[in-house]
Amino acid sequence: MRVFNNFLGRFSQDIGIDLGTANTLVYVRGQGIVINEPSVVALNLKTKQVLAIGKEAQRMVGKTPSHIVAVRPLKDGVISDFEVTEQMLSYFIQKVHEDNFRFWPRPRIVIGIPSSVTEVERRAVEEASLRAGARSVFLIEESMAAAIGARMPIHDARGNIIVDIGGGTTDISVISLGGIVINKTLRVAGDEMNENIVQYVRDHFNMLVGERTAEEIKIRIGSAAEMPEGLETPLRGRDLVTGLPKEIIINSAQIREAIRRSVTIITDAIKAAVEVTPPELLSDIIEHGIHLAGGGALLRGLDQVIQQATQIRTVTVDDPLTAVVRGTGIVLEDLEALQEVLLPSVHNQRLK
């Protein structure tokens, strides 16, 4: 079987995957990023059939009949539904190869996962990928992948700190000499902020809105620091008193108040990581700054809040949304030279 898989591998395209709670991005070796879709799967509960995956499934969220549900098979950066994750990965693998007439793809895959995952959770990612069609799977911590994607000098004898704020988790890592020296992972990130907004609107306006609406509002007017010009936008939902549709005008100051607790938790965790960083590495970090990656890094003013709290210059990396998947792609392009940054495989797979 191994020989057969290796034979099929010659006709497959190796891929890097940022398997995120909110979005899945796919990098194809030699091509770049080819897929950026929501990590959502629409299921028919009566037949157990998968109806849609990715963008098409995302459009169904909150709009389906009772027997159809749109689910996110990953929670807090780890697999919560193994079979659905397997089908989602299989869909993305097939989508990468559909235009190339490859009848049975068997690619090598590099996948970014949160640093805090257990061995059981790592095994679940590997097995889901193998069953989805991969011939071998290599795992890398998302913060390490983000640092590589941001072209940070991770192999130098120098302290680098990167904060990867995704949908389900925030990874804070101090990296030096190709390894992670200090790591903190929080289950507080973009999704938690969306839930904060839902709860705030419920408490202050007696109105119910969905998480997708909350995310749109966060992107449109959300900020972590006070901005020179206040923003406002209409917000529509259901009045919890009358049960009828309701529209209000909400502003950036209110959204800032809603997400303040989550922003504070992230900021305090970064401060805690800095406080336990060895002095020699901390000296480098003060010189080169804190780097932010992930979708959460796009929150207006977040870099200012972190810089003010830590007294360390804070910058957002170029294209923070794709930093992790770009990092998996760089590793994929030179697996042998960068194999030391990979996590040990529970299947003891070799580079082939």
Image (cartoon, rainbow, N blue to C red):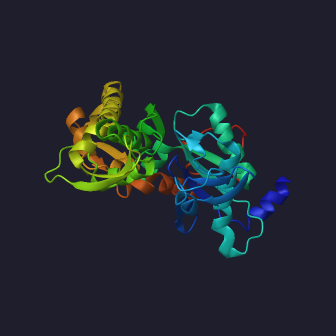
The picture places residue 133, in percent across and down from the top left corner, at 73, 56
The picture places residue 243, in percent across and down from the top left corner, at 41, 45
**Image: 249 above or below 114:** below
Looking at the image, residue 57 sits to the left or right of residue 283; the answer is right
Exactly how many numbered labels are in the figure? 0
Residue drawn at the location 74% of the way across and 60% of the way down: 106
Between 53 and 94, the one lying in front of the other is: 53
Where the C terminus falls, by quadrant? bottom right
Asked whether the viewer can see residue 168, the reply is yes
User: As drawn, which residue projects farthest toward the top?
Assistant: 276
Residue drawn at the location 30% of the way across and 41% of the way down: 205
Between 62 and 269, the one lying in front of the other is: 62
User: As drawn, which residue projects farthest toward the front?
Assistant: 242
Residue drawn at the location 68% of the way across and 71% of the way down: 98
The picture places residue 23, in percent across and down from the top left corner, at 51, 53
The picture places residue 166, in percent across and down from the top left corner, at 44, 45
Between 334 and 300, the one lying in front of the other is: 300
Where the N terminus falls, by quadrant? bottom right
Residue drawn at the location 37% of the way across and 58% of the way down: 319
Image quarter of residue 239: top left
Looking at the image, residue 283 sits to the left or right of residue 85; the answer is left
Asked whether the viewer can see residue 313, the reply is no
Between 69 and 276, the one lying in front of the other is: 69
User: As drawn, which residue projects farthest toward the left?
Assistant: 228
Image quarter of residue 95: bottom right
Looking at the image, residue 277 sits to the left or right of residue 12; the answer is left
**Image: 50 above or below 123:** below
User: As drawn, which residue projects farthest toward the right?
Assistant: 1
